[in-house]
Image: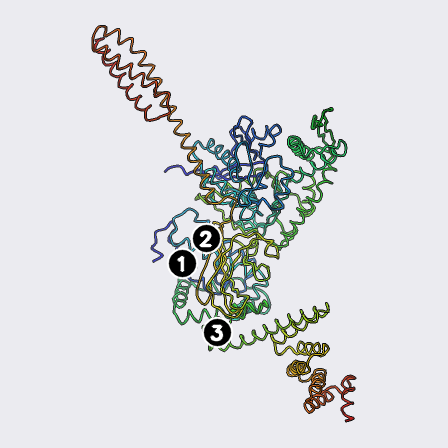
Amino acid sequence: MAEREPVIGIDLGTTNSVVATVQGSQPVVIKSRSGSNLTPSVVAVSKAGKMLVGPIAKRQAITNPTDTVYAAKRLIGRKFSSQHTQDALKVLPYRVHAGEHDDIRITLGEREYSLPEISALVLRELKADAEAFFGRPVKKAVVTVPAYFNDGQRQATKDAGRIAGLDVLRIINEPTAAALAYGFGKMIAGKIAVFDLGGGTFDISVLEVGNGVFDVIATGGDTYLGGEDFDNRVIDWLVADFQKEHGVDLRGDRMALQRLKDSAEKAKIELSTARETQINLPFISTPQGGGAALHLQKTLTREQLEAMCGDLVKRTIAICEQVLAEAKVKPIDLKEMVLVGGMTRMPAVQGAVKEYFRRDPSKGVHPDEVVALGAAVQAEALTGEGADVVLLDVTPQSLGVAIAGGYVRRLIPRNTTVPTSVTEVFNTSKDNQNTVKIMVLQGEAEAAHQNELLGEFILTGLREAKRGEVEIDVTFDINSEGIVSVSARDRETGQQQSIQVTASGGLTEDELKRILDEQADMLLEARAGEELKKKQGELKALAKEVTELIPQLQEATKGSEFGQDAVSKANRALEQANKAAETTDLVKVTESIDTLTRTISLFKGVLQRIGR
Amino acid sequence: MALDEKVDIDEARKKEILELEAKISSPNHYEFLGVPSGATPEQCSNAFREASKKFHPDRYFGKQLGSYKARLERIFKRLVEAHTVLTDLQKRQAWLEANPLIRAAVRAQTGTSGVFRVGEAPSQKSDEEKKRDAERAARLARHPYLAKATRTHEQLARAREAIAKNEFSQAFTFLNQASQMDPNNVEVKTLLNEVRKKNEQIRADASFKVAREALERQDEDAALSAFKTAVGASASHHEAAYQAAKLLERRGADPREVVAYAQKAVDAAPDNAQYRLLLGLQLELAGMKALAKKHLDEAVRLAPEDPEVKKHGKRRWSF
């Protein structure tokens, strides 16, 4: 039997990404071709116009701030006009602008990229690492996203996978994946909490684990709370201080901003182990109109950092309280407490978590790798025969419809196990109302317009009657692939309308197709180019052989007419071959190869006969 | 038959799927989860998790499933519903309220002492018998008469559930459905009547509240129209009628209009002296002396010590 197709799990992180697989019933991280477990989620176009991904891209970020994209995950699937995006733009040195449908585009080098395309570059890098590991093509993958990502963000991540040439089996939540990796193969039974503070997002999930079943009870989080925000606090502090001292706003200088970001992150990481650290940025600014260059030199202590970021830490705990309450679990009821994400190395975070959960976090978990390992476990569980694991995941946000008065009626509350299906009856709100507009909303806000609009449709041809008399069955359905469909049916006439809510990740289906086609073309060209090169090489080798054979033949057939004829023919063929070798026409090249091959065999035949 | 369909599921599991699917329309969540009536939330969760190992669609990911794909989705969604209801105190109570038969079974199972006896009823039947039961139930459910009765019953159950949650407009909808299917069902009729009244009451109360708020804002126009709406919604809302009448009186409206509302108040609450008094005085103004006297007399009879009544009543006596 053929070996089973390899499957991988990918943690597409804000700052770093990891790829893993299950080998011999153990999840393992696949090292990158450069030998590291983490691949920075950074994409850049070098000054020479070369596309760079991962560590090389990260290394050149300081010297190339406008053409280096990092933390793309914070923008993926978001609307350009949203407050979050606008806030993020203030600190991003690369060029971000609005796309056609309020999506976000990034200019990199000469070209404009959508967010899924940027993330696809990172995914493709990971895919290539996995292919190098397995020694054969890899297509199937489970990709993780923060639990609190909405449908648009999930869809955008899926699109990125598609662009990268991956068959994304499933998108699963990061804390769930962490729990899967943590509980896989262990005899744990009970409730566990996963506290996931990563580069860009915060998630907390409570699961009940036992007997191979991972049942998510509640999950919550904030997609704009992570290491980047901690870094930004440090940057703010440095910038404000510098402004006070020298009257120069460093934010205006993209290069300076990139350097600040770099050293802020470094300082933050150092303060997880050291009590204080130096931030040294010589020549950070050259005043306009001459004058000595300015340097930035500061000492940052752990206490200072903790004071700057205290509210961020508090926010994580507040969300924990809320989610535990929803799960109807007290901290004391938890069997285990798992910390995930690089930010959980910060002593202030660990302290706050310890105080709230009243226990030490579980050991033996690598906070950077556990999510990818869990994704690999789920990929294996889906495709393999062996892994005896079921994941009962939930909807992270409520789904409902807009009702009269601008309110929302929630049909599927958050933390409902999926797949699920719910039907409720609605009435008309006006006399003789013969159409209703069904607006499908996602979110927790009371007012309809504050929720994410996933889609809408109109049910027409209702019976004309007094308000409240016409009844409409509205059904929400989330299938096992996570696809939401909504249908509305007039109970009396049986008139029915439905939509499959395909959340937009920013790219329309047409745009996505175009990108995929472009890529297919590029691949085809690349492949054709390779073949051409090979044939041209072959042709050149043959031509050389013929050129070498001609004098021999002339020598051997001196005086004979046959010899003259053959030599002139061979010369003509050579001439043609040289011409063909100049072109990129594969057909002509192939023809010339044939002619030369025939000439050679003819020459060799003649030489042999004469020699005899 | 579905059992013969060529899919990547072994025969035993196929059977289990078909059997459970036959129970999908049963309103009994305990039965569907395969736990005894009155099982604890923990038992329900455990049963749900065990069931999901067999029936979660992910367990069959990428397999050739044919019609079983949809079956598994349906079963799992139903399992989620059963689990959600049984592990949420409020939802479970509303559901039991709406299904008296199941509630009785729960009482019988758990006993008055409150001590729970684990898993008795279901285990007493052999697998063979259970299968036959399921088949019988499925066959019966397909019969047109029973199907109708089941649907009526379902709607009724939903309505009860809604009533228990105080969602009367929902309940009204369900009952309307039920009465369309079975217009002679006495239970449906009575409930419908009750709910209709309750519904009117709620709407009237809401309008009344709005009116009160408007009065506080000194927005008399809005208050008046809200009081009138309240009276329109429920004829039995005497206070709204009285307030409407008072307000009209204060604003110097035509006494006949005031009388109309005062009359409504008196009709709804014949034993209220205040209402009688207002009605009497207004009738007098409108020139209907005889009627006025009748109501004023009644007011005095009802509350002889009330100073207001005394004042107006006295004057009348002196005539």
For mark 1, give the secondary structure: helix
For mark 2, give the secondary structure: helix
For mark 3, give the secondary structure: helix
- Name the subunit of mark 1: B
**Numbered mark located on residue B18 in the image:** 1
B230 and B50: which is toward the camera: B230
Q: Position of residue B141 (x, y in %)?
A: 41, 67
Q: Position of residue B148 (x, y in %)?
A: 43, 70
Q: Position of residue A187 (x, y in %)?
A: 55, 46
- Name the subunit of mark 2: B
**Badge 2 and badge 1 both on one subunit:** yes
**Numbered mark located on residue B54 in the image:** 2
What residue occupies the far bottom of the structure in this picture? B319
The quarter of the image holding the C terminus of chain B is bottom right
Q: Residues within 10 Å of mark 1 (few under 14, many from 20)?
A: some
The quarter of the image holding the N terminus of chain B is bottom left
**Badge 2 and badge 3 both on one subunit:** yes
Q: Earlier in the sequence, mark 2 or mark 3?
A: 2
Compared to A612, does A364 lie above or below?
Answer: below
A88 and B152: which is toward the camera: A88
Which residue in the protein does label 3 denote?
B179
- Identify residue type, mark 1: Leu
- Identify residue type, mark 3: Ser
Q: Earlier in the sequence, mark 2 or mark 1?
A: 1
Q: Residue sitting at 32 percent across and 24 percent down?
A: A588
